Image (cartoon, rainbow, N blue to C red):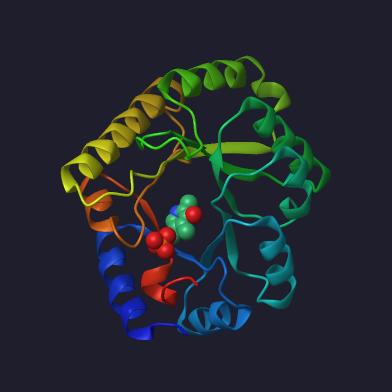
């Protein structure tokens, strides 16, 4: 089941604010993706490789697939032929593997680096120091990493009712995004994505500078 009315009003609201909507279709059937596609949605997010591998061939080929989950290096090859943006890169090794697989398919894969902002142990990602270190490796080896483009940062806030905490975490991500842009991507317009905000916290994320929200349950209903 797809909530067409919610999609319509959300799309209008986000368009007015210049924020990209990624419809998170994980655990939902291909028919739900098709239904939103038919309304005009083109960006969809998945976070299980097998599910994306199953859905991609049976759905329209102009869908922009976002891989938003934690990605293991040995699985990059399955999504490399078509993935549009990989949101949660959190190691240099993974970055190298994405570059290698992108080169095999003669394409450039766009990626975001994941900053760990939540105060929960289960969430993946790097802290500020880890991202800076990764950027230094990247700068040193940029010539051999021609098949990836780092387009921004991504993060997930703590799952809590405390709005001030969520706001503080998103502000931290957006500040660090601006710092990375100013330090490494000053004349690079493609570095323009701060992916933050889900069904429960996207309003706060947008107020704190999000350029891309990842929304699932609000559009597709709760996951089983
Ligand atoms: C599932 C998921 C979302 C969407 O969550 P909702 O609360 O259903 O909107 C967003 N981002 C990531 C990384 C996810 O895994």
Q: Quadrant of residue 146?
A: top right
Q: Quadrant of residue 186?
A: top left
User: x, y (%) of residue 81?
Assistant: 75, 54
Q: Which one is in front, 219 or 120? A: 120
- Residue 197 in the figure: left or right of residue 166: right
Q: Is residue 156 above or below residue 27?
A: above
Residue at position x 55%, y 77% from top?
33
Q: How many marks?
A: 0
Q: Residue furthest left?
A: 164
Provide residue 154's location: percent of width, then percent of height.
44, 42
Residue 215 visible in the snapshot: no
Please say if 38 is above or below 150: below
From the viewer's perspective, tell me whether residue 217 is left or right of residue 165.
right
- Residue drawn at x 61%, y 17% as measured from the top left: 137
Residue 3 is at least partly visible in this image: yes
Query: Horizontal and vertical percent for residue 94?
Result: 67, 33
69 or 4: nearer the viewer: 69
Indicate the quadrant of ligand 1 in the picture.
bottom left
**Residue 133 on image: x %, y %:** 52, 16
At x 45%, y 28%, the residue is: 185
The residue sitting at 64% across, 44% down in the picture is 71
Query: In front: 35, or 18?
Result: 35
């Amino acid at each position: 089941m797809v909530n067409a009315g919610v999609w319509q009003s959300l799309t209008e609201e986000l368009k007015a604010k210049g924020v990209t909507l990624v419809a998170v279709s994980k655990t939902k059937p291909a028919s739900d993706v098709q239904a939103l596609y038919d309304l005009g949605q083109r960006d969809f997010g998945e976070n299980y490789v097998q599910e994306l591998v199953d859905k991609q061939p049976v759905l329209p080929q102009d869908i922009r697939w976002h891989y938003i989950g934690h990605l293991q290096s040995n699985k990059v090859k399955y999504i490399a032929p078509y993935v549009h943006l990989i949101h949660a890169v959190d190691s240099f090794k993974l970055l190298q593997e994405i570059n290698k697989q992108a080169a095999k398919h003669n394409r450039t894969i766009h990626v975001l680096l994941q900053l760990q902002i939540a105060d929960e142990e289960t969430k993946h990602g790097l802290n500020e120091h880890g991202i800076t270190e990764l950027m230094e490796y990247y700068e040193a080896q940029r010539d051999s990493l021609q098949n990836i483009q780092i387009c921004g940062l991504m993060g997930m806030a703590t799952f809590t009712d405390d709005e001030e905490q969520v706001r503080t975490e998103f502000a931290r991500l957006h500040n660090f995004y601006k710092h990375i842009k100013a330090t490494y991507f000053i004349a690079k317009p493609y570095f323009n994505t701060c992916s933050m905000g889900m069904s429960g916290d996207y309003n706060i994320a947008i107020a704190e500078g999000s350029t891309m929200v990842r929304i699932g349950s609000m559009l597709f209903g709760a996951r089983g």
